[in-house]
Image: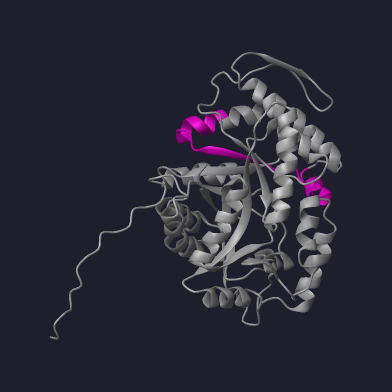
Amino acid sequence: MTVRLHWFLPTGGDGRTLVDRHAYGPNERGALSGVRAPDITYLAQIAKAAEQLGFEAVLTPTGTWCEDAWLTTVALAQHTERLKFLVAFRPGLLSPTLAAQMASTYQRLTRGRLLLNVVTGGDSSEQRRFGDRLDHDQRYARTDEFLSVVRGVWEGEPYDFDGVHYQVEGGLTALPPDPVPPLFFGGSSPAAGPVAARHADVYLTWGEPPAQVREKIDWIRGLAEREGRTVRFGVRLHTVSRDSSAEAWAVANRLLDDLDADTVAAAQAALGRSESVGQQRMLALHGGSRDSLEIYPNLWAGVGLVRGGAGTALVGSHAEVADRIEEYHALGVEHFVLSGYPHLEEAYWFGEGVIPELAARGLLTPGAAPAAPARSPLVVAGGR
């Protein structure tokens, strides 16, 4: 099992700050500082950089504050050649038969570059914006049925399903996807585990310390074995990788400069209302305090002070970040879905610093990392 690397597309905006761009108002000069709009030109820059640097895919989020993942990524597929797109979507917001058809079409249009990230949703207020009024556990029960229908209609024969949430008669995708896109799935609650065990190809967790990640892997692996299935594993992390450890930590500390006490308190109050068990686990790592944010060697919880979802970052020299990736890999983690602020620059720091380290350790599939440029002789120019 080798390491498989993925990057992130900030379709909600990007910049040199951890504070979400939607929380910003104009500064005293009336302009936004350090914030980049998610227009197609900028997103294409990130996608092309990820492809060039050797990332396999890019994750595109879903929700109120970002662009639609399906539309954005199929547009970006026209700007790239090999890069795959890990498209996040919420099962309850469209019909499972339609979703199966959309995925099939996507695979043909992009020649097989689709991966799917199933996001059940852990915030009822966010779900209600889209007309979904089910509670947390009901959403996972619906996801279970949804994915059963999707896999059923991908078989290419009329498919019937009679469940609590979906009743399908003769469901069919006339041209099934080739290849069938793998399903990435996350969830830390008791309601989520059995759904992951039955349907996930890759169980994706946020970046908790290795001992906690090991517990999750053991939990899902055990549930999957009861279903007669094998599940692979991935972790979602931010990165701050530099030529030296001191430089990396200086960058991480600068990311805290925007975070005054009121900003952190407001973010923590909002995140504390989330029904997501995974989100509550993220909050518990730092408790809303700036003290002791390095919760494990090179694992920093500063991102989670103000941002929901993945709240931890690998911080250190390129070798140190590679050490932590190797440690997670030893637990059984195969997929690493990474990001950093800003995403364009951090892709290069990681791609030019950490990827060669991983390749040298034999952790990447041969050919996954871009070839090192040929060494040229040093030529000293004469003065003239």
| Depth order, front residue of 55/285 | 285
At 71% across and 31% down in the image, what residue appears?
A: 225
Q: Position of residue 251 (x, y in %)?
A: 57, 75
At 53% across and 29% down in the image, what residue appears?
A: 105
181 w.r.t. 87: above or below: above
State left or right for residue 41 relative to residue 232.
left
- Asked whether residue 13 is in view, the answer is no
| Depth order, front residue of 309/350 | 350
- Asked whether residue 222 is in view, the answer is yes
Q: Position of residue 186 (x, y in %)?
A: 70, 44
Which region shows up in magenta? Answer: 104-130
Q: How many marks?
A: 0
State left or right for residue 153 relative to residue 354.
right
| Depth order, front residue of 290/361 | 361
Q: Position of residue 331 (x, y in %)?
A: 63, 48
Instruction: Examine the image and state in which quarter residue 155 appears.
Output: top right
117 w.r.t. 98: above or below: below
16 w.r.t. 191: above or below: below
Instruction: Examine the image and state in which quarter residue 282 appears.
Output: bottom right
Q: Per the image, is 127 magenta?
A: yes
Type of colouring? one colour
Q: Per the image, is 237 magenta?
A: no
State left or right for residue 14 relative to residue 211.
left
Q: Position of residue 54 (x, y in %)?
A: 43, 51
